[in-house]
Image (cartoon, rainbow, N blue to C red):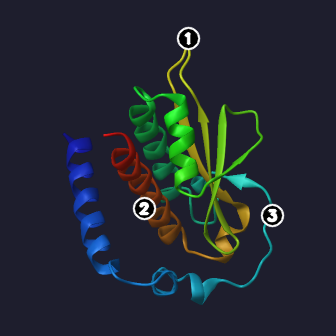
């Protein structure tokens, strides 16, 4: 019951946030997220970390990491590998080489990359996905705003998939 209630609460918050942000420019959205206030020009560390590894991320970030894993496991379970690759490309993602079946970087803001790492399903294991940010993310957003950015990414990915394939 708790999971159902938390999903309902998240969806309500998400719809309210979308309504607040519709018809706003990326600059306005960045300012509202605190990006323009906190961004200090710190260069990328080129070290992708989970949200829980960010400053103050122990509780909110770690919880979001688990949410991402569950959401991606569910989402990827019945999808074709090629469709996921095309989906990421359609969203402007840059596919990078890694040990994963698929790693894609999205630049939400300057110096704020979000990386998706995906292992596709095989005969032994189900599909698994994770979302990471650069270790320098603390210099651009608070942990709360990091999580909101990640939540928007998740929803946008799922919605884009439905637009392309449903």
SS at badge 2: helix
Q: Quadrant of residue 100?
A: top right
In the picture of the structure, the residue carrying the numbered disc 3 is 45
Q: Position of residue 32 (x, y in %)?
A: 45, 85
**CA separation in Å, label 2 and label 1:** 31 Å
The dot on residue 42 is none
From what the image shows, is residue 96 above or below residue 93? above
**CA separation in Å, label 3 and label 2:** 23 Å
Cβ atoms under marks 1 and 3 closer than 8 Å: no
Query: Relative to the observer, which residue lies in front, 95 or 116?
Result: 95
Q: Position of residue 99 (x, y in %)?
A: 75, 33
Q: Sequence order check: which comes first, mark 2 or mark 1?
A: 1
From what the image shows, is residue 41 above or below residue 67? below
Cβ atoms under marks 2 and 1 closer than 8 Å: no
SS at badge 3: loop
Q: Residues within 10 Å of mark 1 (few under 14, many from 20)?
A: few
Rendered residue at 40%/36% (across/down): 75
Pick the quarter of the image with the N terminus: top left
**CA separation in Å, label 1 and label 3:** 35 Å
Rendered residue at 47%/52% (across/down): 64
> Seen in the image, is 143 located left or right of residue 7?
right
Query: Relative to the observer, which residue lies in front, 160 or 34?
Result: 160
Q: Sequence order check: which comes first, mark 1 or mark 3?
A: 3
In the picture of the structure, the residue carrying the numbered disc 1 is 124
Q: Quadrant of residue 137?
A: bottom right
Q: Quadrant of residue 36?
A: bottom right
Q: Position of residue 147 (x, y in %)?
A: 48, 62
Q: Residue furthest top?
A: 123
Q: Residues within 10 Å of mark 2 (few under 14, many from 20)?
A: some
Rendered residue at 65%/37% (across/down): 102
In the picture of the structure, the residue carrying the numbered disc 2 is 152
């Amino acid at each position: 019951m708790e999971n159902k209630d938390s999903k309902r609460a998240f969806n309500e918050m998400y719809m309210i946030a979308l309504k607040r942000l519709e018809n706003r420019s990326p600059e306005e959205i960045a300012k509202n997220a605190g990006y323009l206030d906190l961004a200090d020009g710190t260069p990328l560390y080129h070290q992708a970390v989970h949200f829980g590894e960010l400053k103050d991320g122990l509780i909110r970030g770690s919880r979001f990491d688990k949410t991402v894993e569950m959401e991606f496991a569910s989402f990827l379970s019945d999808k074709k590998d090629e469709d996921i690759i095309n989906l990421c490309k359609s969203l402007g993602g840059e596919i990078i080489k890694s040990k994963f079946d698929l790693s894609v970087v999205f630049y939400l803001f300057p110096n704020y990359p979000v990386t998706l790492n995906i292992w596709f399903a095989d005969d032994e294991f189900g599909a698994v996905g994770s979302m990471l940010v650069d270790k320098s993310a603390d210099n651009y957003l608070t942990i709360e705003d990091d999580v909101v950015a990640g939540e928007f990414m998740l929803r946008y990915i799922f919605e884009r998939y439905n637009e392309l394939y449903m």
